[in-house]
Amino acid sequence: MSITETDFAFAGGAVADVPVAVHAERSVASRRIVAAFGFWIFLLSDVVMFSAFFATYVVLVDMTAGGPSGKDVFNLYTVALETACLLVSSFSCGMASLGARARSNFMYYGGMIATFLLGAAFMLLEIRDFAGTVAQGAGPSRSAFLSAYFALVGCHGVHVTMGLLFLLTMIAQVYAKGYRADILRRLLCFALFWHTLDIIWVGIFTVVYLLGVAP
Amino acid sequence: MFGKLTWDAIPWSHPIPLFAGFGAFGMVGAVVLFLIFKGYAPYLWREWITSCDHKRIGVMYVFLACVMILRGLTDAIMMRSQLAVAYNAPGYLPPDHYDQIFSAHGTIMILFMAMPFVIGLMNIVLPLQLGVRDVAFPTLNSVSFWLTATGALLINLSLLIGEFAKTGWLPYPPLSELTYSPGVGVDYYLWSVQIAGVGTLLTGVNFVTTILKLRAPGMTLMRMPMFAWTALVSVLLIVCVFPIFTATLAMLTLDRYLGFHFFTNEAGGNMMMFMNLVWAWGHPEVYILVMPAYGIFSEVVQTFSGKPLFGYRSMVIAAMAIGVLALLVWLHHFFTMGAGGDVNGFFGITTMIIAVPTGVKMFNWLFTMYRGRIVFRTPMMWSLAFLVTFTIGGMTGVMLAVPPADFMVHNSLFLVAHFHNVIIPGVVFGAFAGYTYWFPKAFGFCLDEKWGKAAFWCWLIGFYLAFMPLYVMGLMGATRRLQHYDVAEWYPWMLVAELGIILVWIGIACQIRQLVVSFRHQQELRDVTGDPWNGRSLEWSTTSPPPAFNFAVLPRVESRDTYWIAKQRAIETHSLGPEPAYKDIELPRNSPTGFVCAFFATFLGFAMIWHIWWLAALSFIGAFVTFVAFAWRDRDEYRIPAPEVARIDRANRSARLAALAHLGAAA
C-alpha cells in the first residue's frame, strides 16, 4: 500500500502553538546543571568500579598464600602523610574554585598549584611505598591479597595521576582563555573529581590500612 | 619491535579462518576504496563520520549492528552445520576452531550486535520523543559510537591476525588465565570488549543526563513515552553495572599481563569471584538489552492498536521494578557453585519474582490490544510473535530458577534454548520492530511490507525449528559447546535445528532484499507528512527525516500522548493553530574527536594484545592530546538563522495542512 495516502497525518505544528518562549528557557536545564549532573553520574559509575575493587579486596584479604599480611607491609607513617596531603589538597582545590568564582588570579592559580604539589607529593609517597613493598618481595604476584591490595590502591593512584593531568589542563585553559563559562563548567567537574578521589581515599584508609593493622 | 606479532600470526595453515578473514576484510576494503574513488569520502567525513547529530550517530550504530548480525549468524550456521555432520564423525571444524566460533558468536551477538542495535534506536528516537534538539553531550555521543566500532574492528581482526578466545563468551578463569590460554585469543576479547565497554558506559552517562535533565517544556516524567521510560531503566543499569565489568576485565588483564592472582588456581586466587563479578554485570546486561525492546513493543502495540497504552503507571512501576530486581539475581547463573540452600533459595526466589512485573507488562500489552483496531503491519507482527514466543522462554526461565531443576540441566542445551528463547524474541524481534517502525523517521521512506513479512515468517519459523529441538536435546542430556557426539537420539533433532538456521538466513536474505526494494521504490514509499503510522508521541510531529534541529520550536507538552491530542484538536478545528515565532537555533558543530580517539584506541588495543609497548604508549598519548585539543576549541556550535528555520518548518506545516485538507475532503 502506498504510504502517501496514510491517514490522519498532520498537526506537527499544532503541538507548538502555545507560547513557549518563557517555558522553553526554564524547562531545559542550564548547561552548567547538565554538565555537572552528567559528571556526577560518571563519578557515581566510577565509585561503582571502586566498589568492585573494594569487594574483591575484602574477599581476598586473608589469602596471603603464606606471604606477608597487611600488618607486615603497611607503613602507617607514610599512609598518614599521604592522607594529610590529599585532605589538604581538597581544601586548596576548594580555594581554587572560590578563586575562580571571585576572578582572583592569586587564589585560583595559588590554589591549583598547591593542589598539584600536594597531589604530586601524594603520588611520590605512594610510589615510594609501593617500591619498598615490592623490594621486600611482597609484590602483587606474591599472593592474592597483595594482588587485590596493589590493584585497589593502585587504581586510586592512577585516578590521582589522571586528576593531575586534568589539573594542569585546567591551569593552561584558564591561563589561555580566562574565566569563560565553558571553562568554569570544566573546573566544576575537575573539583568534583578531585573531591571524589578524596572520599575514596578515606574508604581505602579505613578498609585497607586501619582494618589491616587492627589487632 | 613488534612484540609477539610475527608472520605466523596469520593462520596460513587454516583455510577457513584465512579465507573468511581475507574475504571479510577484502570486502570491507573494497567498499572503502570504492567510496573513496567515487568521491564520497568528503561527504562521509562531513555528514557522518564527524557528525554529532544524534540521528546520524544512531543510524551508524544500527548499521554496525546489521553488519555484526551477519558475522554472528555466520558463526551460528557454521556451528549448526558442524553439529549436523558431526554425529559419530569429527565434522569439518576442528575443536580448536569450533571453540573460537562459539566464543565469538556470543560475544559479537550480545556486545556488538544487540547493544549497538538498541543504543542506535535510542539515539535516533529518544531526543525526538523528549522533544529536544540533541542529547546532553553530543560530542561524547560520537566518542561512544566510535569506541564501540573500535571494539568491533578489533574482535573481527582476530579472524585474520592471531586467534580468538576459546573460553566461551565470558572468559571464565582459570581456563582464561595465561597458564591454560597462552595465546592472544583472550587478550583480543579483553581489549575489544573493554574499549567498547567504555563507549557503552559513556552512552549510559549521556542518556541518563539527557532523559533526566533535557525534556521539552511540560514533559514531566509521567508524561514521557514508554520507550523513554524503559530506556531510562536500561541506561541507569548501564551506569550501575558496566563499571563492575570494567573492573572485572581489568583484574583478568592484570592476572594475564602482570602475574596478579585474582582468579588463578595458585597463591590464593579465587576463580568463583570472577563468576560473581562478571554476572553482577552480565545478568543486568540482558535487562539493559531487553528493556528498550519492551519500550519498542509498547510504542508499536499502542500505535497499531489505535489506543493509548493500557496501564501506563503500572508499566512504569513494572519497568523500574525489573531494573531493581535485575541487580539481585546474578547467582542463578551458577547455582552449581554450591553456595548452599539458603543462598540458592534467595536467588531462586528473586529470579522468579521478576516474572511478576514482566507478567504485568504482558497483560498490559494484551489489554492495549483488547478491542483495539489492530493493523497488522510488520512492526506489529514482530510484537505479536514476541508476546507468544517470549512467554515460552520466560516460563523455561522460571523452571531454571528452581535450583534443584537447574542442577539437572545446568550448562545443557536446555539452557542454550532458554536464553535464545528470551533474547531472540525479546531483543532481536524488538530491534527489528523498532527498525521497521522508525525507519521512515530516519530516512523519509517506509520499508517494503511484502518483503518485511516474508522475512518475519522465515525468522519466526526458523527460530522455532532451530531452538525447540535444543530443549528436547537438553532434557536428553546434551551439554552445550559439544563439538561432536555419538548419541543416535540427538541426531534427527540436530538436523531440524540446522533447517531452522537455514530458514533464519533466508529471513536475513529477505531483509536485505527489502532494503534494496524499498530504496528503489522510495518515491512510492515516501513518508510525506512525517507521521506514517498515525503515531502518538512527539517524534511523529516533525518531518521525516527530521531537520538537524528536530523541532523548529520546542514543543509544549500538556499531557501524555501529547502529539495525539494535538492531532485530534487539529482534526476538529481544521487548523494547525498560528505559526510560531521562529528564532535562531544553535546546534553542535561537527567534531572529529570521536573518530580520532577511536583511531588511537584501535592502535592502543592492538598494541596491548600483541605486547607492542611503544605503540601502546604512543597511542595513549595521541588519545590524550586529542582530548586536550578538543577542549581547546573556542566555538563548538553553529547557528541556523530564523528565516532558514521558518522555511523548513513551513514546509512541514504545509504538508500537514495538505493532509488535513485531504481528510476534510474525504469526510
Image: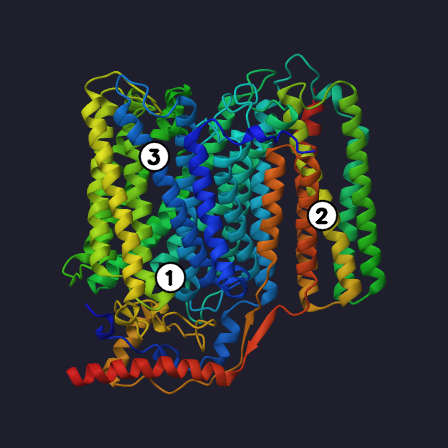
Q: Position of residue A11 (x, y in %)?
A: 31, 78
Quarter of the rendering occupied by the C terminus of chain A = top right
- For label 1, the residue is B222
Horizontal relation, residue A174 to residue B194: left or right: right
State the image quarter where residue B251 is shown.
top right
* Marks 2/3: CA–CA distance: 41 Å
Res. B351 mark: 3
Q: Amino acid at mark 1?
A: Met
For the residue pair A197 and B242, the one nearer the viewer reads as B242
Res. A163 mark: 2
**In the rendered image of this protein, does residue B1 appear above or below residue B138?**
above
Residue sitting at 42 percent across and 61 percent down? B124
Q: Amino acid at mark 3?
A: Thr
Q: Which comes before the other along the chain, label 3 or label 1?
A: 1
* Marks 3/1: CA–CA distance: 28 Å
Residue sitting at 50 percent across and 48 percent down? B149
